[in-house]
Image (tube, rainbow, N blue to C red):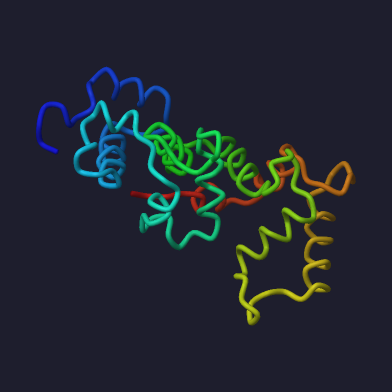
């Protein structure tokens, strides 16, 4: 990747800096990492900006591999109609939200979308159950019993469901997150 056609233009770098929370160096590193996922013959800047990388390839990145929400993260940031691939700009958006410089508001908005497994705009009991299973693991030795899961979800809703409608909406979620001082620093991915 040393030729003149292998680096992002200054104009494009400035545009990406304006649209993301990433520095020039972070954008260049993101582009390099994205291109590494492409076949050798499709790594020119022009082709890399048009290419889409499959979820399987993105999920193979060490930075995502251990994240229990890796598939949801990729699906939330994918602009593909089938949500099964990421463009370079999708990848940049993902890295921007998970950067140290993204605002807590942006981070909590995307965390909510990631945890909203059924994409209905609320966190219901099923979303919360899936969230807990992602965090505790799906194995028999780590999985909560039905009564433990019900009790935990009841406690979560008791604490978070301000309007008592049985779900957590975005503003309720953001209210809870605002009381968690380490949320923003733990909601990150570093290349």
Image point (46%, 49%), residue name: 188
Expressed as whole percent of the image width and height from the top left, the position of residue 128 reads 73, 56
Image quadrant of residue 147?
bottom right
Expressed as whole percent of the image width and height from the top left, the position of residue 111 reads 60, 45
The quarter of the rendered structure image containing the N terminus is: top left
In the drawing, does residue 123 fall left or right of residue 65? right
Residue with the most extreme top position: 11
Residue with the most extreme left position: 3
Observer-nearest of 133 and 87: 87
Q: How many marks?
A: 0
Image point (66%, 65%), residue name: 133
Expressed as whole percent of the image width and height from the top left, the position of residue 138 reads 62, 71
Observer-nearest of 106 and 1: 1
Expressed as whole percent of the image width and height from the top left, the position of residue 25 reads 26, 36
In the drawing, does residue 26 fall left or right of residue 86? left
Q: Is residue 154 above or below residue 14?
A: below
Observer-nearest of 74 and 66: 74
């Amino acid at each position: 990747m040393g030729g003149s056609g292998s680096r992002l233009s200054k104009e494009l770098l400035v545009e990406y800096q304006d649209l993301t929370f990433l520095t020039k160096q972070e954008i260049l590193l993101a582009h390099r990492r994205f291109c590494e996922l492409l076949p050798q013959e499709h790594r020119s800047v022009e082709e890399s900006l048009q290419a889409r990388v499959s979820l399987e390839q993105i999920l193979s990145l060490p930075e995502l591999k251990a994240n229990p929400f890796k598939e949801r993260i990729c699906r939330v940031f994918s602009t593909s109609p089938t949500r099964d691939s990421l463009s370079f700009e999708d990848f940049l958006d993902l890295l921007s939200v998970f950067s140290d410089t993204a605002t807590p508001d942006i981070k909590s908005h995307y965390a909510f979308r990631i945890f909203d497994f059924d994409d209905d705009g609320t966190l219901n009991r099923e979303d919360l159950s899936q969230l807990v299973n992602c965090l505790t693991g799906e194995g028999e030795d780590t999985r909560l019993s039905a009564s433990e899961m019900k009790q935990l979800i009841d406690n979560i809703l008791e604490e978070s469901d301000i309007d008592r409608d049985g779900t957590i909406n975005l503003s309720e979620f953001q209210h809870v997150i605002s009381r968690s001082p380490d949320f923003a620093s733990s909601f990150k991915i570093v290349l």
